[in-house]
Image (tube, grey):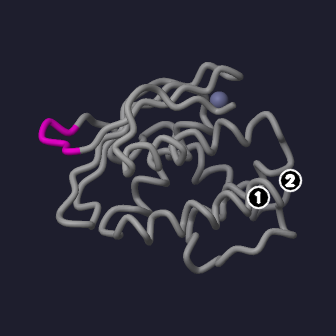
Amino acid sequence: MSDLEELYQEIIMEHNRKPKNFRALDDADRSANGFNPFCGDTITLYLDMADDVIAEVGFQGSGCAISRASASMMTESIKGKSSAEAKDIFEDFHQMLTRGTDGEFDSERLGDLELLAGVSEFPTRIKCAILSWHTLKAALKGQEGTVKTE
Ligand code: ZN
């Protein structure tokens, strides 16, 4: 492993150990649940919207390191964004994970999320990384029930 890869690993593990925005929002006006049956990851995502902007975001749940780190990084990247901007980031993230370096995505928009690019080499882990994002989409749409990664 190169030094750079170790650094990436370190940042991802730090998000797993101390996830950002790991809390329920009492006054959330949107929430959704996600479940990844392939790994057992669960997430509940809370959004507090100010007009069309994600003013506050929180999540709870349990799962593997990748799912927690990805959810933690997601909350940091979408806070303060409009729902359309959040969906654009989702599309970039999805491209990066499913198509790797062949994918068409905006690195600048992804920011730290690009640290998860290595996940694209592990198909079973992609569902772990994408779970929180599917849950976000459901929350933005006001979708009821639990989203599954199938
Ligand atoms: Zn997982």
Q: Which residues are magenta?
A: 25-29
Amino acid under label 2?
Answer: Met
Density class for disc 2 (Cα within 10 Å; few <14, some 14-19, many ≥20) is: few
Q: Is residue 112 above or below residue 133?
A: below
Corner quadrant of residue 94: bottom right
The verdict on label 1 being within 8 Å of ligand 1 is no
Camera-side residue of 15 and 96: 96
The verdict on label 2 being within 8 Å of ligand 1 is no
Density class for disc 1 (Cα within 10 Å; few <14, some 14-19, many ≥20) is: few
Q: Residue at x 55, y 76 (%)?
A: 109
Q: Secondary structure at mark 1?
A: helix
Q: Is residue 68 above or below residue 5?
A: above
Camera-side residue of 76 and 14: 76
**Horizontal placement of 33 versus 10: left or right?**
left
x, y percent for residue 61? 42, 26
Amino acid under label 1?
Answer: Glu
**Horizontal placement of 19 versus 63: left or right?**
left
Total labels drawn: 2
- Marks 2/1 in contact by CB < 8 Å: the verdict is yes
> Where's the C terminus, which quadrant?
top right
Magenta: predominant secondary structure element? loop
Q: Residue at x 80, y 69 (%)?
A: 103
For residue 1, the mark is 2
Mark 1, residue position: 5
In reply to whether residue 136 is colored magenta, the answer given is no
**Horizontal placement of 121 versus 11: left or right?**
right
Q: Residue at x 19, y 66 (%)?
A: 51
**Horizontal placement of 3 versus 28: left or right?**
right
x, y percent for residue 135? 47, 41
Q: Is residue 73 above or below residue 60?
A: below
x, y percent for residue 147? 52, 32
Q: Residue at x 58, y 29 (%)?
A: 148
